[in-house]
Image: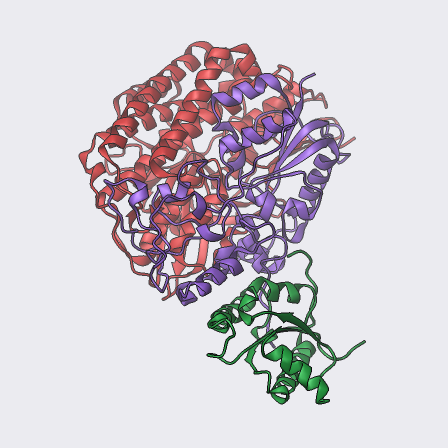
Chain colours: A red, B purple, C green
Amino acid sequence: MAQVISIHPVTRIEGHARIDIHLDESGEVSDARVGISALRGFEQFIIGRPAEEIPRIVSRICGICPWMHHLAAVKAIDGCFGVTPTPAGHLLRELCQVVAHIHDKILHFFFLAAPDFVLGPDSDYSVRNIMGLVKREPELAAQVVRMRQLGQMMLERFAGKAIHPVAGVVGGFAKPMSEEERRGLRADGQVLLDFASYALDYAKGSVFHRYQEEFRSLGAITTGFLGTVDDQGSLRLYDGRLRLMHPDGTWVEFPASEYTDFLAEQVEPWSSAKMVFAKFWDEGFSLEPDAPKGVYRVNTLARLNVCDRIATPRAQAELEEFRRRFGRPAQGTLLYHWARLIELIYACERVLELLADDRITDPAVRTPATSKAGRGVGHVEAPRGTLIHDYSTDENGCITRANLIVGTTHNIAPMNLSVRQAAASLISKGKVDDGILNRIEMAVRAYDP
Amino acid sequence: MPPRLSFEWLHACSGCEIALLNCGERLLGLLDRVEIVHFPLLMDHKYQGWEGGEGEMNLPEAEIGLVSGGVASEEHLVVLRAMREKCRTLISFGTCATHGGIPALRNQWPINEALRTVFTGPEGKGEVSNKIPAHLDRVYSIDEKVRVDVSLPGCPPRPEMILEVIEALLEHQSLHLPNKSVCETCPTVCTGKGRAAVRRFLANAEYDPEEPIDRMRCLLEQGLLCMGPVTAGGCGGKDTPLCIRARVPCRGCYGPVRQGGNQLLDMMNALASNGIDHRGIVDRTSLLRFSGAHGLLRPRRQRT
Amino acid sequence: MNPDPKIIAFCCNWCSYAAADLAGISRLQYPGSIRIIRVMCSGMVHPEMVLHALDKGADGVMIIGCHLGECHYITGNEMALARAEVIADTLEDLGYESERFQVAWISSAEPERLAEAFREMSGRLAVLRGLSPIETVGGG
């Protein structure tokens, strides 16, 4: 008898989602889909509001990565008002963004994903979580909790609020950094860098090698990738050009302001979520499991695949090892976790690099702006992938039109493919258990939706 | 058996949950004393067994339940009612739960219009998906739908405050929720004489970055619209309010200081009473951006 | 059902409330659906009271104080004037037509003007009622 198996809610992810797996009469998977249901209406309710207020409103799209929305919006509003931030303004914004990446990656890897690896995908659901990790590895867990808090406190001490930030403003930043603050942040940054190196060593030495098979096969699909690089082809999180890589490894680069020439949005009849596909490839959009069309991925794995190098030494060494093992582009879905920890090292190194730049304490942090009509596209690389905010304003400087492509939107199509692949390879003859279903969730978790 | 805690999120962004994690090691201390039985962000308890299909909500019983987010869909309502039923003490966790929060800005438009804009995009292409869970006509705070025992506002609530509330409930002590305004907790210099008009925040406030915050002039007196007078304080604990630390004006994220107050009317009243011209405010309804539930934000009347 | 729109009138003790008294003694006619609430000064009517009245089903709200310059408490009615502008603007934001609110200055010796103001307000609201029915909103 045909049957639908539901995983509701998908847990240990940073939002609301469910998975529905359809089995046919013989108990084989006929279809599997991820549904992300939240509809919040930001594109609607920011219309008519003064543009300079938008960065403080759209941060509420996500409480885990509010800095990303805050800064993508600030950059877009810079564009609407035609204002160029001061160098210190840019440096302070980037510093906060990169610090925000640190807490996010620690959260995702250790709090959300690690229980699957450390305690095992088949361990009982009641202990397969951070509380279980605290009991199994109390010292590691305590350090993880401390380090994540440290990243957040760096932001709160310097920029007022860590969650739902306020310090990014059109034209730059709201306050300069004092030498004393700089010293404190450097010390904290060093602690975090040491932890990041330890975290990757721990994962490589004690965790990942036990899951070779999962890394190769779980949720494995072949897609293109999208990320951000500078003019040297180095990984960038705060700004740069978008690079869209085809599954065959060739790529095209474009500024974020031209995103509509390369990407297109579509609502599939079976889903409430918008999906984005690579219009530039001119092959249309299809989620056919054997021959998907127009599908690319974002987030950590994508960024490491599209960049030629990483401009900081430790992360570059890790990238080289990663490429030796998995090639370029690496396609294994669980490799997102590995890439996440490499990016964690980059973020920590970049924090120290930014703090070493003497311009960061320049008191000229903001260029005064004048409200006016215009259009601006702001983009940053968020933990969850390329984030694009696109606004238009009227002559009074109020929003007339908004389009937001958030990281997870790019990944909804590939997530569906991965879940379908995982379900089809794990379920046969209608046999399902908790461990199998958790493995299917792991395919979603890797994307960190 | 240790006391049980249960967490749920509705029309929320997960910022409240992250605020809880920001408690750091104090949180580990709490974990020694309680058992968390349901928490979708962190653990794998599901609503139903996988073979159960669309059956009843399978939420565990708990001594204390925390619900973040407002109520925007039928699904939220089902989860919220189940939480109310299973939790002896229910805490509305964060400003979305207590006052609607930012998502309640949607209440200024009829629901169909909001759906159309989101789905058809700027060019008006595409169709509204028919697969969306049934949306309510507006975004509600949770106390509009079920009885709430403790109201813990903040976007997000201050981490220490979250722990203090949970610990006070565990020890059956009385709660000390802040009842002062942001202004009453703000150390900036207030002379009683400010500018007669408000300007948009397009250039930074005037202050000497070398000097401590208590030497900075009140932002409202500098002509920046600051919601401090009508907003519940507590974001900075005993110290300076958080936005003021970043030298930016308060936008009201803890909701009204007065129980049931209307931040828009109260702020406009405060401006009028102090002879400050309110016409510099571009979008007045933004003053209700954190507290638009309880029927305060509504669509404008269409005149024929 | 009473066809007259329901109006809440906040009347100052020192002027319009006395004028209403005098209007009664003088047998002046005005709509029976006016509900007068005596306040010591027009300046003590918080905008929230106006909104509350509308939320609870009133069709319109009036604040009636002393002529400017004649306030018993020197500047109370100037406060009311400053608030009145805010109220008129804000009501539109909150989903009401600004015509539902009216401020007026009427001394204790002007019962005819008071009755006329009531009639005028009532007429204006009757037109509005024909256009869009009031729905009661709870809370507030």
Q: Residue at x 21, y 46 (%)?
A: A364
Image-quadrant location for residue A149: top left
State whether residue A299 is above or below residue A397.
above
Q: Residue at x 60, y 87 (%)?
A: C110
Q: Is residue A13 visible?
A: no
Question: Exactly how many numbered labels are in the figure?
Answer: 0
Q: Position of residue B247 (x, y in %)?
A: 34, 45
Left of C89 or right of it: where is A258? left
- Whole-percent x, y for residue B276 in the image: 40, 64
Q: Nearer the viewer, residue C108 or B283?
A: C108
Residue located at (47% from left, 73% from top): C74
Query: As displayed, is residue B65 above or below residue A283?
Result: above
Residue farthest to the left, as pictured: A358
Q: Residue furthest right?
A: C1
Horizontal side, residue B165 vs residue A145: left or right: right
Q: Report which quarter residue A305 is drawn in.
A: top left
Camera-side residue of A303 and B178: B178
**Residue B204, can we see it?**
yes
Image spot of residue C134 (x, y percent): 69, 69
Along the line of sight, which residue is nearer the eye, A131 or A319?
A131
Q: Position of residue A202 (x, y in %)?
A: 42, 12
Looking at the image, residue A346 sits to the left or right of residue B279; the answer is: left
| As drawn, B111 above or below B233 | below
| Figure quadrant of the C terminus of chain B | bottom right
> In the rendered view of the protein, which quadrant contains the N terminus of chain B?
top right
Task: Determine which quarter of the picture holds residue B9.
Answer: top right
